[in-house]
Amino acid sequence: MPTNTTTPCIVDAQIHLWTAESVTDHRRAHRPDGFLAEEALREMDAAGVEVALATPAVWAGAVNDYCLEAANRYPDRFRVVARLPFDESSGVGELERLADSPAVVAIRVSATRNAAAVLDDPSTEWMWEAVERVGLPVTIFAPGALDTVRGLVERRPGMRVIVDHVGVPSHTTPESTAAAIAGAVGLADLSNVAVKVSALPCASTGSFPFGDLDHHVAAVRRAFGTGRMMWGSDLTRLPCSYGEAVRHFDRAGWLFAARERASIMGGTAKEWLRWV
C-alpha cells in the first residue's frame, strides 16, 4: 500500500471493475466499454484514494474473476468484495475458495427486486450459515427492505453486516432518500451492523458540495457513530468528479473531528474487514 505520512489512508468502500467483453446487460451498465483497473488507478491517484474495494458488476455477469485479477496485479491498491452464486452446490465451495484469498475482504449480496427470496428464504439459509462460519462480513444492498435485513441480522448475530449506500435506492427522490436513511438509522441498535455512506452524491438534488444531504449525514452519524460508517463512491455512476466525492466529507467537517473523518474515510473499513 502506498505510504502517505501526512494524511490517513483513504479507502473507497465501493467501486465496480469490469471489461467491455464481460457486459451482459448493456441497459444497466454504467459504462458499456468497461472500467478497467488501470483507469480506476488513474482516478484514484488524482483524487487521493489509496485503496478501493472492487465488487463485480451485475451487468457483467457478477463474476469475480476480473476483480480478483486486478487485486492480484495491484495488491496494494485493490481488495475484493466478492459475489456468491445462490446455488448451494457451487456456492459453498466458492465461498471456501474466496475465504482463503487474501484479496477478498467481504461478500456482497444484492436484493433489489425480491429481497425476501434472497434474505429470508430457507433456500438461501446455507449462504448465511456459511458466511457466518468463515467470518467474512457481508455487504447488502436491499433498498426498501431493511426490515428484512433486520430479521437476517437477528437470526445471525455472529455475522457482520454492512448496509450498502445507507439503503438508498439507485433511482431515488428526496422522499425515498429520507425514508431509506430513516430505515438505516433504525438498524443502529444492532451492534454487528455498519453502513456505507456511499454513492450519496447520486441522491443529491444539487451540485457539490451537496448541502441538501447534510442533515442525512448528521442523522447517520448520530445513530451509528463514525466507527460504524465507511465512505464509498460507486465511482462509475457519480454525478460529480471523484475528487468532489472525496471532498464531500471535508465539506461535512462541521460534523466530524479529524480523527472521526479518518475513521469514515478508511479506518472503519479496515477494522470491519480483514486487513488492519
Image (tube, grey):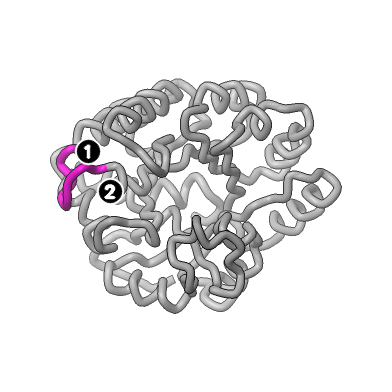
At horizontal 17% and vertical 46% (from top left) the residue drawn is 206
Q: Secondary structure at mark 2?
A: helix
At horizontal 40% and vertical 55% (from top left) the residue drawn is 234
Q: Position of residue 250 (x, y in %)?
A: 18, 51
In the depicted structure, whether residue 207 falls above or below residue 211: below
Q: Circles 2 and 1: CB distance less than 8 Å?
A: yes
| Magenta region includes residue 166 | no
Q: Position of residue 276 (x, y in %)?
A: 49, 55
The local crowd at label 2, few if under 14, some if 14 to 19, many if 20 or more residues have their Cα within 10 Å, is: many
Identity, as a three-letter code, of the amino acid under mark 1: Leu
| Magenta region includes residue 208 | yes
Q: Is residue 21 left or right of residue 129?
A: left
Q: Which mark is residue 52?
A: none
The local crowd at label 1, few if under 14, some if 14 to 19, many if 20 or more residues have their Cα within 10 Å, is: many
In the depicted structure, whether residue 188 falls above or below residue 2: above
In the depicted structure, whether residue 36 falls above or below residue 220: below
In the depicted structure, whether residue 128 falls above or below residue 31: above
Q: What's drawn in magenta, residue-wise?
A: 204-212
Front residue of this view, candidates 253 and 128: 128
At horizontal 58% and vertical 38% (from top left) the residue drawn is 111
Identity, as a three-letter code, of the amino acid under mark 2: Pro
Front residue of this view, candidates 31 and 185: 31
Q: Secondary structure at mark 1?
A: helix
Front residue of this view, candidates 5 and 120: 120
Residue 176 sits in quarter: top left
Q: Position of residue 237 (x, y in %)?
A: 37, 57
Q: Which residue is mark 1?
A: 213
Q: Which residue is mark 2?
A: 201
